[in-house]
Amino acid sequence: MPTPQAFARTVRHPGPPEPERIVSLEGQAMQLDFTLEAGLSLRDAISIPLSRAGLDGGTVRFANLKIAALHFLMPALAVDDQHAAFYSAPHAMEEGTVIEYACATYGRKDGEPFVHCHAIWRGRDGQRQGGHLMMEKTIVGQATPAQAWGLHDATMATRYDPETNFTLFYPTRLSDQAVVATGKRVVLARIRPDQDLTMAVEQACAAHDMRNAIVRGSVGSIIGAEFEDGRVLDDRATEILIRAGEVRDGIGRLDIGLVNPQGQVCEGVLARGCNPVLICFELVLEEQ
């Protein structure tokens, strides 16, 4: 196992660390433009069109989505030593709101479609909020376009993770047949704790001989945050998504949206080498 990187902000996880810190696979890229249909749960509005299109695992992005009922969780500190961090109690805006932007990982749990989504929206007081959406209870209020990127022969499947004591997504092949991409590739990856996020994205690209890629999927958590402009958040638990991310000539740049346990939303470009993953980070890369 490589020597762990030293960070200013760290946490201790309940289980032993796995040697492989970035788990990834690649395949022939799929891209889908579709509509999130009004009246459906956000889970069904995503999973039904992707399933019909044969996209088995990947990511979905959407913006300016009117929600008829919003149910969500925020990051929270752990109340015992069984987890490094946890979730808040459930929150709801039954009157709905508008989601400014969101990113979702699409995969499978116990063989059924499963969606993990982080988003930023406006609260009742007009202030921006964010967090982890409860997809079965969050209802689409108005038909809205969305985009998906992923693979037809692999998915993100949930599995128990002893290191963090959570059930988490893992890139998973759906067939034993070797698939050779003949055009643009997509990489599905899971980044484990205590890896600098920007550098880990670069390493995921390098593992698949990609010099240039766009970050399409970006759901996860980091320990506080340090931004290029010098701002530092010392929070232990944050949930994030990448607003715009790329690797160009092997060097990554990640412009993120973040919510902390107090509900504060922060945005900006992460400082390279300073931002360790907290629980995990689900990553989808599209080759350029």
Image (spheres, rainbow, N blue to C red):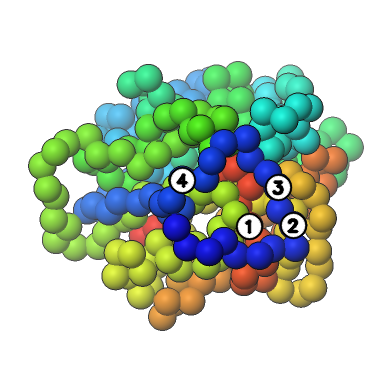
| Tag nearer the camera, 3 or 1 | 3
Q: Which residue, as the protein is rendered here, is positioned at the far bottom?
A: 249
The answer for how far apart the CA atoms under marks 2 and 3 are is 7 Å
Residue denoted by label 2: 9
Q: Quadrant of residue 151?
A: top left
Mark identifier at residue 276: 1
Cβ atoms under marks 4 and 3 closer than 8 Å: no
Residue 34 point in image, percent of width and height: 39, 40
The answer for how far apart the CA atoms under marks 4 and 3 are is 16 Å
Residue denoted by label 3: 11
The N terminus lies in which quarter of the figure?
Answer: bottom left
Cβ atoms under marks 1 and 2 closer than 8 Å: yes
Near-viewer residue (278 or 40): 278
Mark 1 vs 2, N-terminal side: 2
The three-letter amino acid code for the residue at tag 4 is Glu
At a point 45% along the width and 68% down the height, the residue shown is 202
The C terminus lies in which quarter of the figure?
Answer: bottom left
